Image: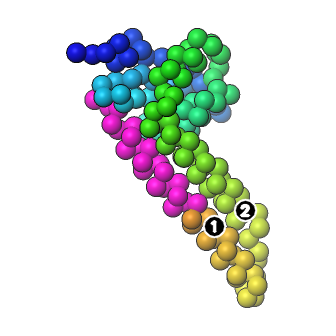
Amino acid sequence: MLTRSELPENRVALPVADTAGQHLVTAERVRGGHIRIQCTCAAHMSEGWCRHQIELLCLRYDAVTERDSEAEFHFEDVVMGTPLADIADEVDLALADYDAALKAFEARRPAGLDAGRLRQVADLATDLAQAANHLDGALARFKKRLASGRV
Ligand SMILES: [Zn+2]
């Protein structure tokens, strides 16, 4: 027996756009309180997750092309307070840390092999490695949680 929140008509679709074009993110609650959230973009197809999902799960609608408060309310009703949304927040922070560490490495990496400069490269590389490890772990948990919403 399905409860009301598990019925298929709870599916909500949000159109998003980026430099690669138009995509459609869909979300619905499925059995066991899991969320099925998909996107039509190439990154989602190849990696099994995408930044569109993370943005929306963090309730940021900047990429949505046709703003519709009813659809957004519906989306929030589906995803808010779920473990998937919690992990998306974690991925979001890890992505920001990784982007910042990568930028810092590229911008501040000194040329030259003297001890001071090598120390600086090592420090920047350590920060980048820690950010990459943290992001890798958060993404693995996110993808595992996404997979639990697939039937
Ligand atoms: Zn996407």
Q: Residue at x 75, y 88 (%)?
A: 114
Is 116 above or below relative to 32? Answer: below
* Helix, strand or loop status at disc 2: helix
Q: Is residue 64 left or right of residue 81?
A: right
**Side of 11 relative to 113 (left or right):** left
Q: Position of residue 102 (x, y in %)?
A: 66, 59
Task: Report the predominant secondary structure element of the magenta stretch.
Answer: helix
Q: Mark 1 sits on what residue?
A: 127
Residue 8 in sight here: no
Q: Could you tell me the amino acid type at mark 2? A: Ala
Which tag, 1 or 2, sits closer to the chain's start? 2
The Cα atoms of the two marked residues, 1 and 2, are separated by: 9 Å
The number of numbered badges drawn on the structure is: 2
Element carrying mark 1: helix
Residue 127, position as x, y percentages in the image:
63, 67
Closer to the camera: disc 1 or disc 2?
1
- Disc 1 crowd rating (10 Å Cα; few below 14, some 14-19, many 20+) is some
Which image quadrant is residue 116 in? bottom right
User: In this rendering, does residue 147 appear at all?
Assistant: yes
Q: Residues within 10 Å of mark 2 (few under 14, many from 20)?
A: some
The answer to which of 118 and 34 lies nearer the viewer is: 34
Q: Which residue is mark 2?
A: 104
Q: Nearer the viewer, residue 16 or 8?
A: 8
Circles 1 and 2: CB atoms closer than 8 Å: yes
Q: Which residue of the protein is positioned furthest toward the bottom in this rendering?
A: 115
Magenta residue span: 131-151
Residue at x 64% of width, y 26% of height? 61
What number is the disc on residue 53?
none
The verdict on residue 39 being magenta is no
* Residue 132 located within the stretch drawn in magenta: yes
